[in-house]
Image (cartoon, rainbow, N blue to C red):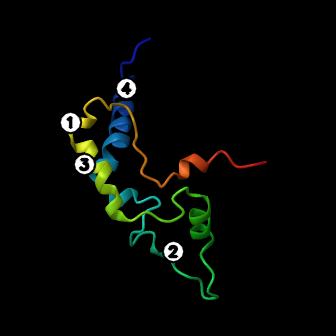
Amino acid sequence: MSTAVSSPISASSRSKISLTPRTSPSQRSGYIATPQTAPLRERQPDGSRHPFDSFICAKTPAGRWLDPSELGGPAVFLASHASDAVNGHVLYVDGGILAYIGKQPK
């Protein structure tokens, strides 16, 4: 089975997926408490939580939005020699939400 890249577009897409989270985490803030996600974390006029905020806090194993400082550990790992053998993998720093998505009860 060949593992060669099938086209320049494919190669470009793969590099964007692997490099974007490393080079610009603020653009891919996900479930991290940033100014971009602030509207989702604000209390509603009636005092309730935004439905998406409630979902993240209830369904994410971390039970909360991540703090931007929590990206430091994965960034140090990816920048170190400890990650030299990590290739072709997307490291999700999402508080565990992917463990929930797709496994909802019927």
Q: Disc 3 vs disc 1: Cβ atoms closer than 8 Å?
A: no
- Say what amino acid the circle numbered 3 marks: Val
Q: Residue 69 appears at what percent x and percent y?
A: 32, 63
Q: Disc 2 vs disc 1: Cβ atoms closer than 8 Å?
A: no
Q: Nearer the viewer, mark 2 or mark 3?
A: 3
- Say what amino acid the circle numbered 2 marks: Arg
Q: Which mark is residue 76?
A: 3
Compute the Cα span from label 1 to label 4: 30 Å
Q: Residue 105 appears at what percent x and percent y?
A: 75, 49
Residue at (25%, 32%) from the top-left corner? 84
Q: Nearer the viewer, mark 4 or mark 3?
A: 3
Using the image as rendered, state which of residue 51 and residue 76 is in the foreground. 76
**Which sits earlier in the primary sequence, circle 2 or circle 3?**
2
The secondary structure type at the circle numbered 4 is loop
Compute the Cα span from label 4 to label 2: 41 Å
Compute the Cα span from label 3 to label 1: 10 Å
The residue where tag 4 is placed is 7
- Say what amino acid the circle numbered 1 marks: His
Q: Which mark is residue 81?
A: 1
- How many other residues sit within 10 Å of disc 1, few (<14), some (14-19) or many (≥20)? few
- How many other residues sit within 10 Å of disc 2, few (<14), some (14-19) or many (≥20)? some
Compute the Cα span from label 4 to label 3: 32 Å
